[in-house]
Amino acid sequence: MGGDYDTAAFSAAFHALPTGTFDALWQGRAYRVVRQPVAGARGWKLQAWEKAGGDYISLNLYHLGKGPALRPCEMSADKVVAFVKELQVVGRAKGTKPATRQA
């Protein structure tokens, strides 16, 4: 994945999040988050919009033969890693599936 962080802990935190759309808190701010499979479920996309502000988080996580590959979208890997590891899910949108483990 690159960077100086525990890839196993990041992957576990990422895959513990619900699939679909849900509400969450990060650093005291409310977000609407979408986590969905891409590339035939060989990867995942996560997008998050701050509800009362302009913050936006976006990343792709691919599962390659050599291990996970994190691809933040126009932001630092440190920010997306902190977001995923510290995110607190507070509610799911109707019809959201439970979390899946694909690590």
Image (cartoon, grey):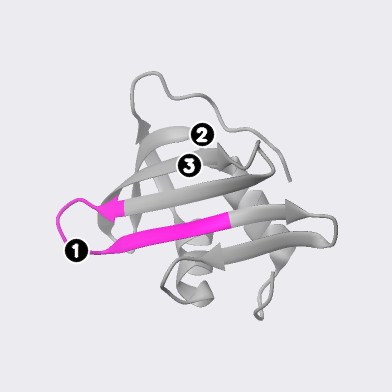
Instruction: Compare marks 3 and 1 and give the one earlier in the sequence.
Output: 3
**Vertical order, 5 against 58 (above or below):** below
Q: Amino acid at mark 2?
A: Thr
Q: Residues within 10 Å of mark 2 (few under 14, many from 20)?
A: many
**Vertical order, 82 against 62 (above or below):** below
The N terminus - image quarter? bottom right
Element type at mark 3? strand
Which numbered marker is on residue 19? 2
Q: Residues within 10 Å of mark 1 (few under 14, many from 20)?
A: few
Q: At 26% across and 51% down in the image, what residue appears? A: 30
3 and 2 marks in contact (CB < 8 Å): yes
Tell me where residue 60 appears, x and y as whole percent: 55, 56
Element type at mark 2? loop
**Residue at the top extreme of this rendering:** 95
92 vs 76, nearest the viewer: 76
2 and 1 marks in contact (CB < 8 Å): no
Q: At 45% across and 62% down in the image, what residue appears? A: 83
Whether 45 is among the magenta residues is no
11 left or right of 92 in image: right
50 left or right of 37 in image: left
Task: Give the labeled residue for mark 1.
Answer: 54
Quarter of the image for residue 96 reads top left
81 vs 25, nearest the viewer: 81
Whether 58 is among the magenta residues is yes
Instruction: Compare marks 3 and 2 and give the one earlier in the sequence.
Output: 2
Residue range (magenta): 49-60
Tell me where residue 9 appears, x and y as whole percent: 68, 60
Task: Give the labeled residue for mark 3.
Answer: 35
3 and 1 marks in contact (CB < 8 Å): no
How far separated are the C-alphas under marks 2 and 1? 23 Å
